[in-house]
Image: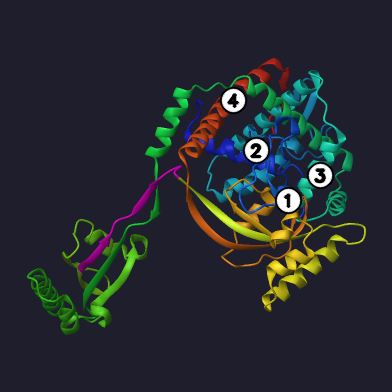
């Protein structure tokens, strides 16, 4: 795309904020949404070893990032509001642009973005115009989203915000948002998503030669798995703040003498014991540390000093430092795409029902967590009480790679330490207790590496195709810009 890197970052942030604000309500902890792909774009979910529950799996999809968002009923101007644009006679109001921007600005400010408010308003307006044009095209083509899919999307939104659908409806009512408008926005989101998947599918073509190059590119990229570290030791010759010029000269000469003796091969630990005014334990060693945990002065002074070498004396506010590099440990890297971080976890699932309210299920799981903390066996309780197919194996979900569980489950799982048990977690399938048992970096086979490279290449091509397609759709729409948003 012909945008600067800063512009790309801003556009991506605004798009993400818009997409994740689909069901947001104006409360302290806003409701967020991530609508799952429609069945038309889905395939069958993989089931890794360990008998992981199919209900938790994410069905693979080639969906692109969607930009539809929560929309209060602002298509007709409110008191004191005005229309900033028309898209095929559909109005976009200043209030709507400001509402969208308010949600995006929290992310932009956190990222240190310095673009002007006028620039941000313009970008949000562009996203809204793009969105309306795509909704109009989907309707023109006769697209329809079944009520069952809208209801499923509602369940997803509620689960992502750790609440039931009735609770979500209550939050929306408290915010003054009619349920019909909320569902209409969900329907439009799903409709546009389906349109994009259909349109972009025909535009994306990959050759095996391109996949071959993508594999090579992926393997040539390396990530740091262990940072470089160094172990330094020092002799500190303190210089008092009130020292006279003669005293300062004498202390500098003393530091130079220590440095010469250290460079001549004398035992550094012995010099520390004899001369240092600092910590003399461990021969003055600061321990093995990465560079960011060492004094910047020391890092600069020893940058070109090999292991066993001596740097200094260098001066600081404390005095003179003679520094010896005891050892250096080079950083460790690995090729991107040759391994994947996997997690082995187990869970207990309870489903809310007419006989078991969400509150009661949550409290029951909280009680189970307390019992496990007191020593009861997680696996035994899972076999007895869990309502998931994994109950037979003690709740075991096997080894899984990122993206194989629904987002609301995986997001919590990824924050847990080994053997830590989560509080009750809501997903679209019920309430869970999650325990992480192990983590590992699993090597990828040649076939898996190729599939990963193919997926990454496909995503890049989809992004490129989406940019061109979105411009075409907007170009076909009738857009009238009126007074700029404020």
The residue beneath circle 3 is 154
Locate residue 92, reporting x and y percent.
Answer: 76, 30
Give the image quarter of residue 284.
bottom left
Q: Which residues are magenta?
A: 324-338
Locate residue 58, reporting x and y percent.
Answer: 68, 43
Locate residue 423, reporting x and y percent.
Answer: 70, 65
Q: Nearer the viewer, residue 80 or 69?
A: 69
Q: Nearer the viewer, residue 297 or 368?
A: 368
Mark 3 vs 4, N-terminal side: 3
Mark 4 Cα shell of 10 Å, populated few (<14), some (14-19), many (≥20): few
Mark 4 vs 2, N-terminal side: 2
Tell me how far mark 4 sits from mark 2, CA to CA: 23 Å
The residue beneath circle 4 is 467
Report the magenta stretch's main SS. strand
Residue lying furthest right in this view? 354
Q: Nearer the viewer, mark 3 or mark 2?
A: 2
Q: Is residue 233 left or right of residue 254?
A: right
């Amino acid at each position: 795309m012909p945008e600067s890197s800063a512009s790309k970052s801003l556009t991506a942030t605004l798009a993400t904020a818009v997409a994740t604000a689909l069901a947001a309500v104006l409360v302290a902890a806003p409701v967020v949404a991530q609508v799952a792909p429609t069945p038309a774009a889905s395939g069958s979910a993989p089931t890794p070893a360990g008998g992981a529950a199919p209900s938790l799996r994410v069905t693979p999809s080639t969906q692109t990032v969607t930009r539809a968002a929560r929309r209060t009923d602002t298509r007709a101007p409110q008191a004191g509001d005005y229309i900033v644009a028309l898209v095929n006679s559909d109005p976009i109001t200043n209030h709507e642009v400001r509402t969208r921007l308010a949600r995006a600005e929290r992310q932009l400010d956190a990222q240190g973005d310095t673009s002007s408010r006028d620039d941000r308003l313009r970008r949000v307006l562009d996203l809204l115009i793009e969105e309306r044009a795509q909704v109009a095209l989907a309707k023109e083509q006769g697209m329809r989203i079944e009520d069952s899919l809208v209801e499923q999307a509602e369940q997803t939104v509620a689960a992502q915000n750790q609440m039931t659908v009735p609770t979500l409806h209550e939050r929306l009512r408290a915010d003054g948002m009619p349920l019909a408008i909320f569902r209409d926005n969900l329907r439009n989101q799903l409709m546009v998503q389906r349109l994009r998947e259909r349109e972009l599918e025909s535009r994306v073509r990959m050759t095996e030669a391109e996949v071959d190059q993508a594999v090579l590119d992926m393997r040539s990229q390396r990530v740091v798995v262990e940072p470089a570290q160094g172990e330094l030791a020092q002799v500190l010759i303190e210089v008092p703040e009130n020292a006279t010029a003669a005293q300062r000269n004498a202390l500098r000469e003393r530091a130079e003498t220590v440095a010469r003796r250290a460079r001549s091969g004398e035992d550094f630990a012995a010099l520390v014991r004899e001369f240092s005014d600092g910590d003399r334990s461990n021969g003055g060693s600061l321990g093995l540390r990465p560079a960011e945990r060492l004094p910047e002065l020391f890092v600069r002074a020893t940058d070109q000093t090999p292991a066993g070498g001596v740097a200094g004396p260098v001066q600081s506010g404390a005095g003179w430092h003679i520094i010896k590099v005891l050892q250096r440990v080079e950083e460790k890297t690995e090729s991107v795409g040759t391994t994947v971080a996997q997690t082995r976890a187990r869970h207990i699932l309870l489903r809310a029902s007419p006989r078991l309210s969400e509150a009661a299920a949550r409290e029951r799981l909280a009680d189970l967590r307390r019992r496990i903390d007191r020593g009861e066996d997680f696996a035994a309780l899972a076999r007895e009480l869990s309502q998931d197919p994994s109950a037979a194996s003690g709740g075991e979900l096997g080894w899984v790679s990122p993206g194989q569980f629904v987002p609301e489950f995986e997001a919590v799982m990824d924050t847990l330490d080994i053997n830590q048990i989560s509080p009750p977690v809501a997903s679209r399938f019920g309430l869970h207790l999650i325990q992480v048992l192990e983590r590992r970096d699993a090597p990828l086979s040649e076939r898996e590496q190729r599939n990963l490279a193919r997926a990454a290449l496909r995503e890049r091509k989809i992004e490129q195709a989406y940019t061109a397609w979105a411009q075409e759709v907007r170009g076909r729409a009738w857009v009238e810009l009126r007074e700029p948003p404020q």
